Image (tube, rainbow, N blue to C red):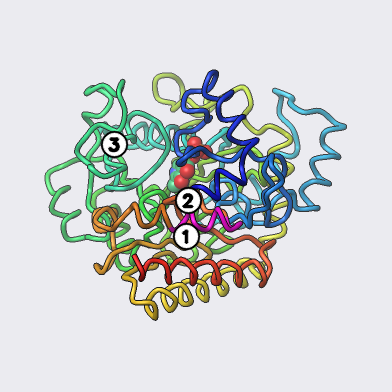
Amino acid sequence: MLNSYVDKTKRSKDLYKRAKRVLPAGVSYAIRYFEPYPFYTARAEGSKLYDVDGNEYIDFWLGHTALILGHSPPAVVEAVKRQLENGTHYGTSHELEVELAEQVVKMVPSAEMVRFTNSGTEANMYATRLARAFTSRSRIAKFEGGWHGGYDALHVSVKHPFDIPESAGLTAGALQDTIVLPFNDIHSVRNRLKKEEVACILVEPVLGAGGGIPAEKEFLKGLKELCDERGILLIFDEVITGFRLAPGGGQQYYSVTPDITVFGKILGGGFPIGAFCGRKEIMERIDTLVYERPQYSFHGGTFTANPISTTAGLSTLKLLEDGQLINKLNHVGGKIREKLREIFETKGVHVQVTGTGSLFNTHFTKEKVTDARSASRADKQKQINYHLNLITNGVFFLPAHTGALSTAHSEADIEKLFLETDEYAKQCKRL
Ligand SMILES: Cc1ncc(COP(=O)(O)O)c(C=O)c1O
């Protein structure tokens, strides 16, 4: 299987050799590397990626799940072309940022006011600072397997083994105020926080990098109750689930309204963005006209509310607003999870299919997967082999990562996923 990948990707192999000299690991983000080397993309359109050797891949990775309308959707491309004529970056206030903030407020239950950033990492960083400023508490809590970006205070217990530092260079000081909690286990969360004063609890409604594992509704409701009882701010990291599970994101999907919400990915319509939003009384802490130093919570950045990202995001959200496209995607997502389960089951391969809405993932294990710890006990190599097999046959998942659907995927694309999965499941059985 690796041999046929290498046969098909000769130009990528050469590029990888060049890349390794100037980019550590030959990539711009560690997770984009996979064995034996990643293919290099030449262009993308709709549901497809095309590499420098001319191979075509049906893309279920979708730019880290950001591209819910597929690659280069016409409405977004048109909006961006128009904006290019009017300036690429202002560094001043402009109407598009107001319109996009209004659109977010209209769609998202918890949003009364919004601030934009350039990435999900930044948005989580500023949201954490805001929660600390608002509550005058230092400690914060996150979940095992939760990925909120590379901000030091949140870069802990993301990957198995959960007790080893995620990176060199993270100081004890940066992490000393972070408490790690078990996902989908409200009883243990209550116990762990019994004697703690925390500013916020950060949670992904669906653990994305942690395995595409949905929170149970009762768990999120329990978190909300606990936060309300204890004056803790509940932060939903909706960088993946935002504008995907429902027009109003995971909070609408689960009917649980957090205090602060963090966005990224889909909000930028294929361009870099992030945002955090919440109730006016909380967001006002950023308002330097209301709070003076040292009471206000700083947020800013050169490229914040860049007009290209804001116009792309606005045209994307307008297409998602009425929920029709999202409902359809969720329906297809359900069918995919069902069919993948059936394929592996009939071939006698033990696989747990996780996900919800238009997100799905596969874990090669007999055991039910409800958190990142149970996911970590699955056979990761088998999952990587499955994905590499798909890649070699023209279906792209970033190996060992959650897959996502876009409105650009056709029935034929999905049939191809089933066909190639079936082929792999047959091989699995023979192994
Ligand atoms: C849930 C979640 N939060 C935060 C981030 C970080 O966002 P970014 O990569 O834009 O910094 C990610 C990225 O994958 C994510 O999945």
**146 is within the stretch colored magenta:** no
Q: Which residues are magenta?
A: 386-395
Pointer 3: what residue?
156
Give residue 222's position: percent from left, percent from top.
27, 62
How dense is the environment of label 2, judged by Cα within 10 Å: few (below 14), some, or many (20 and up)? many
Disc marking residue 250: 1
* Amino acid under disc 1: Gly
Q: In the rendered view, does 51 fall on the left or right side of 236?
A: right
Secondary element type, mark 3: loop
Given the image, on which type of amino acid does mark 2 rest?
Glu
Instruction: Kindly identify the residue that appears in the image at 62 percent across and 72 percent down.
Output: 328
The residues bearing labels 3 and 1 have C-alpha atoms spaced at a distance of 23 Å
Q: Is residue 154 at all visible to an observer of this figure?
A: yes
Q: Percent position (x, y) of residue 132?
A: 34, 33
Measured Cα–Cα span from mark 3 to mark 2 = 19 Å
| Pointer 2 residue | 238
Q: Is residue 16 above or below residue 98?
A: above
**Disc number lying in front (3 or 1):** 3
Q: Secondary structure at mark 2?
A: loop
| Residue contact at pointers 3 and 2, CB within 8 angstroms | no
For the residues bearing labels 1 and 2, Cβ distance under 8 angstroms: yes
